[in-house]
């Protein structure tokens, strides 16, 4: 896994609902209101409390806690709404959003209630191009994994499962979230998707709820409520390493680098910020 070429905001999904723009402005929902703060300015497009937020290189997307949710893509420069999206089957709050890191043209939304659906939008056209029931319990975080082979890959997580998806084009603008057996039949091992049971099944042991994701098509690092970081291979979902990192939940996680060597930064409820190498070996810690 490398972080080369990926800005932290484009390769991270966090339950903390705070992000950093390339302009160095912080973007975050104002608790209990319909406002989204952008530095010292505010996006005013919503009418109810904002529950999910993500940013791209020149875009923001946000969604409300209401049912059905308000799902907007907007400009942080002008604070103008670029798209207002709705799905006829929307049942409740969106728990996580992600914009495709390469161009921002695709928007991913993960529902925050039981039987959570994962929905993929071509937002400029207002078109839902794929959706799937992703988790039995409420969704927490979702992330585009930058493709290494032209395949659109996605990670999503709930309290009890982490899943890696491949998205296939069926022609005529139709897309499908491939289940594991379908992915193998469609394109062999290179497109395999998988699910990781965080509730104690398989060889993973019981793990705590995921709070953050970051990574690319080669691998994914998670930050959990028990303060641990974990690295997984996207193809096959193998747990590569689990590393105790913080006393209390991991509140923030991002990939950084740019010199060809992967590094990760985590921030915890214990007030510590820690730097890790690509194998989750500790490099430094700041209190």
Image: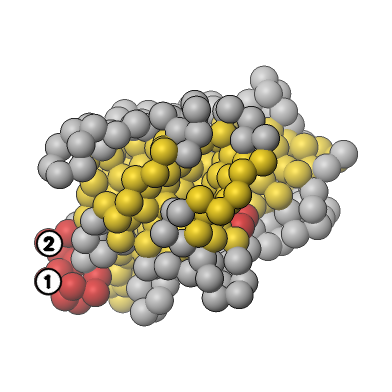
Q: Residue furthest top?
A: 32
**Which element carries disc 2, helix, strand or loop?**
helix
State whether residue 120 appears in this view: no
Q: Would you call the spot at circle 2 few (<14 residues within 10 Å), some (14-19), or many (20 or more)?
A: few
On screen, residue 61 versus residue 26, left or right, reads left
On screen, residue 55 versus residue 236, left or right, reads right
Q: Quadrant of residue 149?
A: bottom left
**Where is residue 130 shown, x and y percent of the image?**
35, 57
**Which element carries disc 1, helix, strand or loop?**
helix
On screen, residue 262 versus residue 48, left or right, reads left
**Where is residue 6 shown, x and y percent of the image?**
58, 67
Q: Residue furthest right?
A: 40
**Front residue of this view, candidates 137 and 8:** 8
Give me the C-alpha separation between circle 2 and circle 1.
6 Å
> Tell me, what colour scheme is on the image?
secondary structure
> Residue placed at 27% from the left, 52% from the top?
239
> Does residue 234 sit above or below 275 in this rendering?
below
> Does residue 54 sit above or below 209 in this rendering?
below
Residue highlighted by disc 1: 185
**Where is residue 85 shown, x and y percent of the image?**
55, 47
Answer whether labels 2 and 1 touch (C-beta < 8 Å).
yes
> Does residue 22 sit above or below 159 in this rendering?
below
Residue 25: which numbered mark, if any? none
Residue highlighted by disc 2: 181
**Front residue of this view, candidates 244 and 269:** 244
């Amino acid at each position: 896994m490398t972080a080369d070429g990926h800005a932290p905001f484009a390769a991270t999904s966090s339950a903390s609902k705070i992000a950093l723009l390339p302009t160095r402005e912080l973007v975050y929902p104002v608790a209990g209101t319909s406002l989204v703060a952008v530095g010292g300015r505010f996006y005013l497009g919503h009418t109810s409390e904002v529950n999910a937020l993500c940013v791209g290189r020149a875009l923001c997307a946000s969604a409300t806690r209401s049912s059905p949710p308000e799902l907007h893509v907007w400009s942080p420069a002008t604070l103008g709404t670029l798209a207002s999206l709705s799905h006829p089957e929307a049942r409740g709050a969106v728990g996580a959003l992600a914009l495709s890191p390469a161009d921002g043209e695709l928007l991913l939304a993960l529902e925050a209630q039981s039987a959570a659906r994962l929905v993929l939008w071509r937002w400029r056209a207002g078109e839902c191009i794929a959706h799937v029931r992703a988790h039995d319990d409420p969704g927490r975080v979702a992330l585009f994994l930058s493709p290494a082979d032209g395949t659109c890959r996605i990670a999503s997580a709930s309290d009890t499962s982490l899943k890696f998806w491949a998205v296939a084009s069926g022609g005529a603008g139709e897309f499908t979230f491939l289940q594991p057996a379908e992915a193998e039949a469609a394109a062999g091992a290179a497109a395999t998707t998988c699910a990781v049971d965080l509730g104690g099944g398989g060889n993973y042991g019981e793990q705590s709820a995921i709070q953050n994701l970051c990574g690319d098509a080669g691998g994914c690092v998670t930050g959990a409520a028990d303060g641990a970081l974990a690295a997984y291979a996207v193809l096959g979902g193998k747990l590569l390493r689990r590393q105790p990192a913080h006393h209390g939940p991991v509140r923030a996680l991002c990939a950084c680098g740019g010199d060809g060597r992967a590094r990760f930064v985590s921030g915890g409820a214990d007030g510590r910020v820690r730097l890790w190498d690509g194998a989750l070996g500790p490099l430094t810690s700041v209190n």
